[in-house]
Image (cartoon, rainbow, N blue to C red):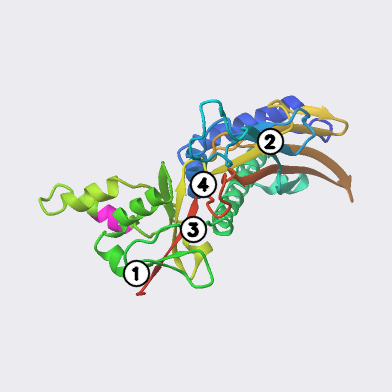
């Protein structure tokens, strides 16, 4: 059992607590208690093309760099003579991004209070770590929903009976298209006409119930068609946070793979390390792949009470892959369900 030695947690004691947190996560209820609902951010991460961002050299920099080819000035021209060779010069452009998301969560444990607590110190701290990281995961997911809303582009094409929302860039879609599954081929057509080569959708309950019913009817002779249509569209559903964030609108986002990138940065090693009177380490998220959180532990003695303090930090950023030659083409389109147009 990990207990404070001389009023503080040693690095080895903290390592034991982290092992306890791992054990709780894989326990029969641990996964359920601390599983964060992060479907929106997980969708972005699953469709993020690797190698987009380069981390700058210094670990102290909260900056990443994206490099791409600039070929926007290329064009055709009338033939002149065989001695005129070449054209516009190709070059590489780059853009530096500052990690603009920073969040912390923490908790305290008073030693005296544990004398009447059914949990051991080890169990209490391990649960505190798991719960704090769950809250951080869900906060990052909320930021990803807001990111989609604030980075919608303008569609260059509108399917029959579809239109651009007045005063916004959303594509308005009548509810009748959802009722008879016409929305699926029209979404795919919209994606193609906007040069989306790998489109997918993110929504809440919108399309979820209809797709579920279509899947259940797939074995019926008259249900195969609808099920096949839904299988043509890559869909993600955030049934916990998405609709609440977009209320009162019924929304989905049509996104092209590689249009967005999420970057996070941790500064400390896996093993707790002493920093003066503190211990510092990093831990992976159990819900978000390749996301790590920095942790800091310290303690204080005040008014005859020893308090153990734990804080979790994340530094991250959500960014658009530069749209290229057309600023309004962001790779994200907002689709809004309405009663009629």
Task: State left or right for residue 206 relative to residue 242.
Answer: left
Image quarter (top left, top right, bottom left or bottom right) of the N terminus: top right
Mark 2 or mark 4: whose residue is earlier in sequence: 4
Mark 3 or mark 2: whose residue is earlier in sequence: 2
Q: Which residue is mark 4?
A: 33
The spot of residue 97 in percent (x, y) is 70, 42
Q: Which mark is residue 174?
A: 1
Q: Residue furthest left?
A: 221
Q: Which residue is mark 3?
A: 242
Mark 3 or mark 1: whose residue is earlier in sequence: 1
Vertical position of residue 26 compared to residue 199: above or below: above
Residue 27 seen from this side: yes
Q: Which residue is mark 2?
A: 65
The spot of residue 318 in percent (x, y) is 62, 46
Magenta highlight on residue 211 = yes
Q: Residue at x 77, y 30 (%)?
A: 59
Mark 1, residues whose alpha carbon is within 10 Å: few (<14), some, or many (≥20)? some
Quote the CA–CA distance across marks 3 and 2: 30 Å
């Amino acid at each position: 059992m990990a207990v404070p030695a001389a009023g503080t947690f040693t690095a080895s004691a903290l390592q034991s607590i982290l092992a306890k947190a791992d054990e709780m996560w894989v326990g029969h209820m641990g996964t359920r208690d601390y599983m964060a609902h992060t479907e929106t951010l997980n969708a972005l991460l699953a469709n993020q093309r690797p190698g987009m961002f380069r981390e700058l050299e210094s670990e102290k920099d909260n900056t990443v760099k994206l490099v791409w080819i600039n070929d926007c000035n290329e064009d055709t021209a009338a033939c002149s003579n065989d001695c005129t060779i070449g054209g516009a010069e190709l070059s590489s452009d780059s853009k530096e991004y500052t990690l603009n998301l920073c969040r912390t969560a923490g908790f305290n444990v008073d030693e005296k209070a544990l004398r009447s607590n059914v949990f051991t110190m080890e169990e209490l701290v391990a649960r505190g770590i798991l719960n704090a990281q769950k809250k951080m995961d869900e906060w990052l997911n909320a930021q990803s929903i807001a990111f989609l809303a604030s980075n919608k582009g303008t569609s260059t094409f509108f399917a029959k009976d579809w239109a651009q929302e007045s005063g916004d860039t959303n594509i308005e879609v009548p509810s009748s298209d959802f009722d008879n599954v016409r929305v699926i081929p029209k979404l795919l057509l919209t994606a193609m006409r906007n040069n989306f080569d790998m489109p997918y959708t993110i929504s809440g309950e919108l399309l979820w119930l209809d797709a579920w019913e279509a899947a259940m009817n797939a074995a019926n002779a008259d249900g195969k068609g609808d099920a096949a249509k839904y299988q043509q569209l890559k869909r993600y559903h955030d049934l916990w946070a998405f609709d609440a964030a977009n209320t009162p609108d019924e929304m989905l986002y049509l996104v092209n793979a590689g249009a967005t990138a999420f970057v996070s940065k941790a500064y400390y090693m896996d093993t707790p390390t002493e920093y003066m009177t503190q211990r510092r380490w990093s831990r992976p998220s159990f819900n978000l792949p390749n996301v790590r959180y920095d942790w800091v532990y310290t303690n204080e003695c005040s008014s005859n009470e020893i308090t153990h303090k734990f804080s979790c930090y994340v530094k991250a950023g959500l960014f658009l892959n530069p749209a290229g030659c057309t600023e309004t083409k962001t790779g994200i389109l907002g689709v809004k369900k309405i009663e009629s147009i």
